[in-house]
Amino acid sequence: MSQTVVLEQNAVETQSITLKFDGCSSDANPSPIVNPENQSITIKFDDQASNHHTIPVSIPNVDSETEAAVNEFLRKHGSSDEESVRTDAMNDLWSFIERQEIGTVVVLVKFASDVKNFELLEIFCQRVADVIAKKTVEEVREIFNIANDFTPEEEQAIRDEHRWAFED
Amino acid sequence: MWNNLPSDLLSNVFSYLPPHSLARAMATCRHWHDCGRLTTRDTSRHHHPPWFIAFPTRSSKLCFVHNPIESTWHLLNLEHVPSLTRPVLTIAGHGLILFKSTGSVPLRLSVCDPFTGQFRHLPPLQKPRTNPAVGVIEDCPSQFKVYVAGGMSKAESGGAASYEPTLEMFDSRSNEWTVMGSMPVEFAVRLTVWTPNESVYSREVLYWMTSARAYSIMGFEMSSNKWIELSVPMGDTLEFAAMVPRDGKLTVIGGTQGGNVLVWELGEGDEWNVIERMPVELGRRFIGGSTKCVGIEGGVCLYKEIDKGMVVWRRDGNHKNKWEWCWIEGCNQVSGKRLENYPIKGLFLHPNLASSSFF
């Protein structure tokens, strides 16, 4: 979870502050946000930087293989600042996700949003978008199990709204 | 049910979709339609290629759009756009086109989203004028500013018209025009007489290029409120030229009579460096007739009439730092009907299908 620290200054000229979390100091170098109105400084710590994930997260409504793949990503991605390591972690997770049912990916989108992990959210949203893209309306309905609740007139009006999208 | 994502998450997914996939997703059911109308596109986050839009110079009632992913042309009707207006430039990230009134009336600007049909006029200027230079800066997805510089104003009590040496700005958030400052009359004259094309904002300077030869560039430095001038490389030899923003820097693309097309980038000390040349094979296919060009972050298009092929230089979708040259067939028929060939004004934008609060 992201941590927020609010520091209030009471007319003291200079202060130096070292922050420690869970017994280890943070190396995230976040930028403080100063609010001159109430003389407070807010520093937000991003998940990845301040929490070294050695404790796997549990993901509701997915199978153990999926949960393991996501945790492997979190572990690998959080373990290093090196671009190549992070890219590998993303590629591995991406390859895994491409082989999963769309229902699983949608559950993962919700999960990533709930835990506010923006890297995961981006991967899962991109995957859902890739499944939607380049398909016909009927194909999308079938894949996502969507019931068509438009009247025939409404549906025609919507297709007319963006005729250019339905021309082939 | 798992397939009922809450609106904000579904909109987030939709922001990854290219426009025609989004339009189809919106046709699947009511929930997806409503979410689609909320989906704003943050073009800095997702790489979507821009769309080229061609306006026939004699009519503003319709335009042709090119889908860069499917490589198809489509007709868009613009019934809501009044007659006697002409497109000036795009507010590209917002998916909007800025129109101006034609004729000798003082400039009146209006804004239109060609994909949703939304249209409205901007309020009248603080200092009425005709034929000024018009530019735009997009601050963020929810705000843009339109700048108007120079132009001619009617004198008081029946005297001669004179040049209007001021810069005015319209802020989309406050819905108001504000006079930003004045300019040397000589700049006002050049910005008026030579009917400048689209502006480019780079490194806190708003640039315009004159459309007459010899080409030159004028710029307004935002922080110091100063006007500056730059020469255009090969400015007196180029047959056509346009400014294009590229990775935040100012570039110029231009071509000579012989069919050589070059791209220069403005570097340190206001020096121009050649960064690219159009491949010879494309140059050969593109010969003949008068060429125009237009650009945007991520793409440049060289074009002639609507039915002639076009040359595009654009960012490669898969490799963000690589750019590719490609040929686009012109549009010579739409819905099975053969099109009359006519001259066009080309612009780029990122289609927006969401309802905008600006209207």
Image: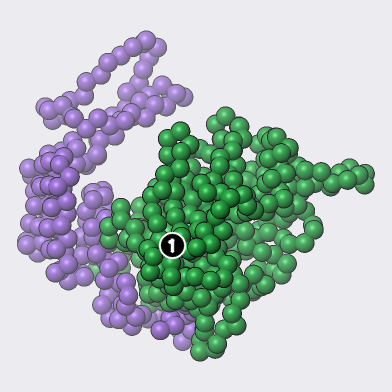
Chain colours: A purple, B green
Q: Nearer the viewer, residue B312 or A17?
A: B312
Q: At x 39% / y 26%, what residue is drawn?
A: A34
Q: Is residue B187 left or right of residue B313?
A: right
The quarter of the rendered structure image containing the C terminus of chain B is bottom right
Residue designated by label 1: B50
Question: What's the residue at 61%, 49% (across, down)?
Answer: B214
Outermost residue to the top: A13
| Image height of A133 relative to B8, above or below | below
Q: Which structural element holds mark 1?
A: loop
Residue found at the far bottom of this picture: B336
Question: Can residue B333 be seen?
Answer: yes
- The three-letter amino acid code for the residue at tag 1 is Pro
* Quadrant assignment, res A22: top left
Question: What residue is shown at x 64% (from left), y 53% (from top)?
Answer: B212
User: Above or below — where is B351 with respect to B330?
Assistant: above
Of all residues shown, which one is farthest toward the front?
B258
